[in-house]
Amino acid sequence: MNPIATIISRQQFFAGMDDALIERIAGCAAEKQFDQDEVIFREGESADRFFVILEGQIAVKIHGVQRGDIMIQTLDAGDVLGWSWLVPPYQKQFSAQATLPSRALVFDGAILRRMCEGDHDLGYDMLKRFIRVIAARLQATRLQLIDVYASEK
Amino acid sequence: MASNAVADPLVSRPWRVKRRIREAHDTFTLEIESRAGESFPFTAGQFNMLHVHGVGEVPISISSNPAETALIRHTTREVGPVTKAMRKLDAGDTIGVRGPMGVGWPIEAIEGRDVVLVAGGIGLAPLRPALYRLIAEREKYGKIVLLYGTRSPQDILFKHELEHWRAQFDLEIHVTVDRAIGTWRGHVGVVTTLIARAPFDPLETVALVCGPEIMMRYTLMELGRRGVRESDMYLSMERNMKCGIGTCGHCQMGPFFVCRDGPVFNYAQIKWLLGKAEV
């Protein structure tokens, strides 16, 4: 296994993935460092990458003209950042900024998308992994939406 | 006759407000002492019925250290007429007290175990006495982890104490907020998102959970996913408590009276009642 494939295979997100598939997706992945406060992507940009965080912390933000940047989520080692690469029109819905010095695996979503279209076993495997992340985020978002810490009376 | 009247659990005793402490924009702590100079032993997790003359009475958990029995603290959010009136009380004012009431956290029974406390919003207040107890006898427990979620950095309760505890090497304190602006560098997300990566061994862990009921339901589910046994999860329930001694039935939940049999329950005992609408 090449070094990137080895790192991928150690991530919980890819647990149980076939070695041959890991080798294939490793071809469109690289490791990248981010300084504290470095902006990783901005709302509205083309969504051609996603990230698996290896170290540090990354904040997901939305910008309000009056309110400035509002942090709506932080992600830590092991978490996946970004799924807009899977959903047309492939555009980032939020911004992301490192709140600590961070390190992540960066995947080229555009290439991976084409690989998934060409190999539905890979596509289905990737979708199953992402749907778990999306479902967990949806549940967390619903709890935030109902202001879960408010008194129920 | 007078001594019998004082011992009557339905008769409140007059206590003096020593201090009111602002904790957050809608949350405050009342520090009170007995006008008769009585000592007030209580168990972590118990509550008092607090009476504001001419306004009404509400159940409020005790939020102070069980080792300090002369000055008692209650931390509450301003949500109704009684707590609004309580917020106007100042040093020297009188407040009626009935208690302590109910069943608290099983602090002695969990000696030797890892303890994970999960608090949501004002739910940190009833857990604070448990934390004091665990810290006071630190050597009797394994890992102690507090996971605390609240709306925003401005809503964090007991900030100085949390900072102090976090600086200790034998406590894990993780705080998360629903949203943040400005200089916040901590975690953002609901408290359930902290459970998956919190440092504890699920099979060695006892969880103490307190917060609004929806938050507790999702927390218990997440603890279960992590592998904590249902019989090792405890939660503090909130219902419409009136008499405080299990006679009036206002807080009845299935076969239980929350004021008498709780507010702290074992999850396995009441799992089937969670999420059911109040009668």
Image (spheres, coloured by chain):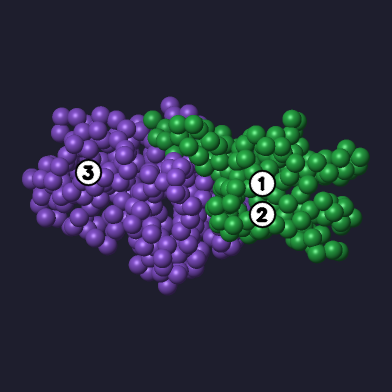
Q: Disc 3 residue type?
A: Arg
Crowdedness near tag 3: few (<14), some (14–19) or many (≥20) residues, C-alpha within 10 Å: many
Q: Could you tell me which residue is drawn at 72 percent across and 46 percent down?
A: A50
Marking on residue A53: 2
Which residue bears the numbered disc 3? Answer: B98
Which residue bears the numbered disc 1? Answer: A81
Q: Quadrant of the C terminus of chain A?
A: top left
Q: Position of residue B90 (x, y in %)?
A: 15, 42
Q: Could you tell me which residue is drawn at 55 percent across and 52 percent down?
A: A37
Q: Are marks 1 and 2 in contact (CB under 8 Å)?
A: yes
Q: Position of residue B72 (x, y in %)?
A: 23, 52
Q: Position of residue A5 (x, y in %)?
A: 81, 59
In front of the other: B258 or A54: A54
Q: Nearer the viewer, mark 2 or mark 3?
A: 2
Q: Could you tell me which residue is drawn at 15 percent across and 29 percent down?
A: B54
Q: CA distance from mark 2 to mark 3?
A: 52 Å
| Quadrant of res B48 | top left
> Quick one: label 1 or label 2, which is nearer the N terminus?
2
Q: Disc 2 residue type?
A: Ile
Q: CA distance from mark 1 to mark 3?
A: 52 Å
In front of the other: B181 or B70: B181
Q: Are marks 1 and 3 on the same chain?
A: no
Compared with B171, B75 (above or below) is: above
Regarding mark 2 in the picture, which secondary structure is present there? strand
Which chain letter matches label 2? A
Regarding mark 3 in the picture, which secondary structure is present there? strand
> Chain B in the picture: what colour?
purple
